[in-house]
Image: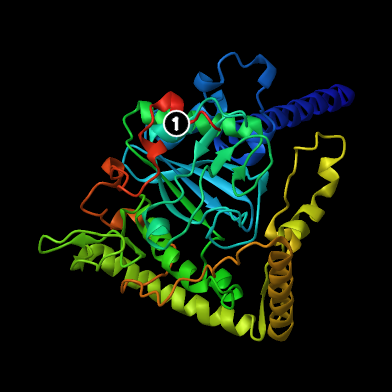
């Protein structure tokens, strides 16, 4: 009898252990299916050789499952966010309450240049700023598998004399001013935009930032010549963090303004004087509250990085970090590592020396090639609207959205100075790309 009891007990314990293993395995699989994150996407790539119609390829089932779990309709609006420094692209999607939540993120395979906006044709810079993408921005016939035009130059870029064209989000992992993904990634990103447009979204907002605009990152980059431009972008960044809805974007006096309502019958003119403007009171209060948290975090970061600043690596330095990935691949495959991998914190005196050497090398190269020096990317005398630029963890539901619904915002018709190709029929608009 004692032996029987021992055997029975062993079988019982074995059964409990097996049930627990099966339970945790089930939970792990469900968590993986619902994340919608890059790790899940990397393990669920589509075999492109079996894709019969890339333009209509449906989103993977695990993403649809994640949408259902988050209360998102398949055709609800989306927003795209890019963070250059860490090489990240995010897809945010509207839930039933019209607030946005992240549904997918991707590692950008390649982006050229350094941190900072695109200023001039040929500078190899990928755009930074706020861009409105319409259905016409989708290119189903790209030589880079699929592509989405970023919309550069936008109203802000044009007003500030910035030039360039055909800057895309596309496949092939090779960039000369674009944000290049793998073909599997761009297949999904294209599908997100296609479904949103089918659902009636007029414009998809693309937010392209140099980095996540936290107090610590702003302190790290405080000596960069683009810092004033980034502070302006941060106002829009913070508006989204507060409301979890794409901000309404306008341009006047050659600068961005966010969630501003023109009063007294005024209108926004990109190069003209800003009209009298007002911000919804509740939004103003929420931003002010966040400002207190941001100011405290900024002060802590200044103490932490006293005498130090971030060295932004060159494109060559970023490529060196991931050079081994190119082995055995076609020459066109040119991934770039992240600035976080190749950059570093240095003493301010060392950064000044590095920047001086960079400027000298750039001038030497331009002289040798006969190229016209590219103007500084730093805007002149930027005066951002009096809104605090803080970000903190507050309850978004307590903050009313702007009076004009960003989901219904329609980008204005191109100005008379816009490229004439913008008037081409859809199938001809992309004939060169």
* Of residues 141 and 14, the one drawn nearer to the viewer in this rendering: 141
Q: Can residue 92 be seen at all in this image of the molecule? A: yes
Identified at 47% across, 79% down, the residue is: 296
* Of residues 70 and 246, the one drawn nearer to the viewer in this rendering: 246
Locate residue 227 relative to residue 172 in the image: left or right.
Answer: left
x and y percentages locating residue 258 in the rendered image = 32, 60
x and y percentages locating residue 20 in the rendered image = 69, 32
Identified at 73% across, 45% down, the residue is: 335
Quarter location, residue 235:
bottom left
Callout 1: helix, strand or loop? helix
Task: Give the answer, above or below, for where 52 lies relative to 324.
Answer: above
Locate residue 116 relative to residue 109 in the image: left or right.
Answer: left
Find disc 1 in the rendering and name its residue.
429
x and y percentages locating residue 208 in the rendered image = 50, 53
Query: Which quarter of the rendering shows the N terminus?
Result: top right
Q: Can residue 344 be seen at all in this image of the molecule? A: no
* Of residues 105 and 349, the one drawn nearer to the viewer in this rendering: 349
Task: Give the answer, above or below, for where 65 lies relative to 375.
Answer: above
x and y percentages locating residue 169 in the rendered image = 55, 40
Identified at 67% across, 46% down, the residue is: 110
Identified at 62% across, 17% down, the residue is: 51
Quarter location, residue 173:
top right
Locate residue 139 relative to residue 26 in the image: left or right.
Answer: left
Q: How would you rate the neighbour count of disc 1 (Cα within 10 Å): few for under 14, some for 14-19, many for 20 or more?
A: some
């Amino acid at each position: 009898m004692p032996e029987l009891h021992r055997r029975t007990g062993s079988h019982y314990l074995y059964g409990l252990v097996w049930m627990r293993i099966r339970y945790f395995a089930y939970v792990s699989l469900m968590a993986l299916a619902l994340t919608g994150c890059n790790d899940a996407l990397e393990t669920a790539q589509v075999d492109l050789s079996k894709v019969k119609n890339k333009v209509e390829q449906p989103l993977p089932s695990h993403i649809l499952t994640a949408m259902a779990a988050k209360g998102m309709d398949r055709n609800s609006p989306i927003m795209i966010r890019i963070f250059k420094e860490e090489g990240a692209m995010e897809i945010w999607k509207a839930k039933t309450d019209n607030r946005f939540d992240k549904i997918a993120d991707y590692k950008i395979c390649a982006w050229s240049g350094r941190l900072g906006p695109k200023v001039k044709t040929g500078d190899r810079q990928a755009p930074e700023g706020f861009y409105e993408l319409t259905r016409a921005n989708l290119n189903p016939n790209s030589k880079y598998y699929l592509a989405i035009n970023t919309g550069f130059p936008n109203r802000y870029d044009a007003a500030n004399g910035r030039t360039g064209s055909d800057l895309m989000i596309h496949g092939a992992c090779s960039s000369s001013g674009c944000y290049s993904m793998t073909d599997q990634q761009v297949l999904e990103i294209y599908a997100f935009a296609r479904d949103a447009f089918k659902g009636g979204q007029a414009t998809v907002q693309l937010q392209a930032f140099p980095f996540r605009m936290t107090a610590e990152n702003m302190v790290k980059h405080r000596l960069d010549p683009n810092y004033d431009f980034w502070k302006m972008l941060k106002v829009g960044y913070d508006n989204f963090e507060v409301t979890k809805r794409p901000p309404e974007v306008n341009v006047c006096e050659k600068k961005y303004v966010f969630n501003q309502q023109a009063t007294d019958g005024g209108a926004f003119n990109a190069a003209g004087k800003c009209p009298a403007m007002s911000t919804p009171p509740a939004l103003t209060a929420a931003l002010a509250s966040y400002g207190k948290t941001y100011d405290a975090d900024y002060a802590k970061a200044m103490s932490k990085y006293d005498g130090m600043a971030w060295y932004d690596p060159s494109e060559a330095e970023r490529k060196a970090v991931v050079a081994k990935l190119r082995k055995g691949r076609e020459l066109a495959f040119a991934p770039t590592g992240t600035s976080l991998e190749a950059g570093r914190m240095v003493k301010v005196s060392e950064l000044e020396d590095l920047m001086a050497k960079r400027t000298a090398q750039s001038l030497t190269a331009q002289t040798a090639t006969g190229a016209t020096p590219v103007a500084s990317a730093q805007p002149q005398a930027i005066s951002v609207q009096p809104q605090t630029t803080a970000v903190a963890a507050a309850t978004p539901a307590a903050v009313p959205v702007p009076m004009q619904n960003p989901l219904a915002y329609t980008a204005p018709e191109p100005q008379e100075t816009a490229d004439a190709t913008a008037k081409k029929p859809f199938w001809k608009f992309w004939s060169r790309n």
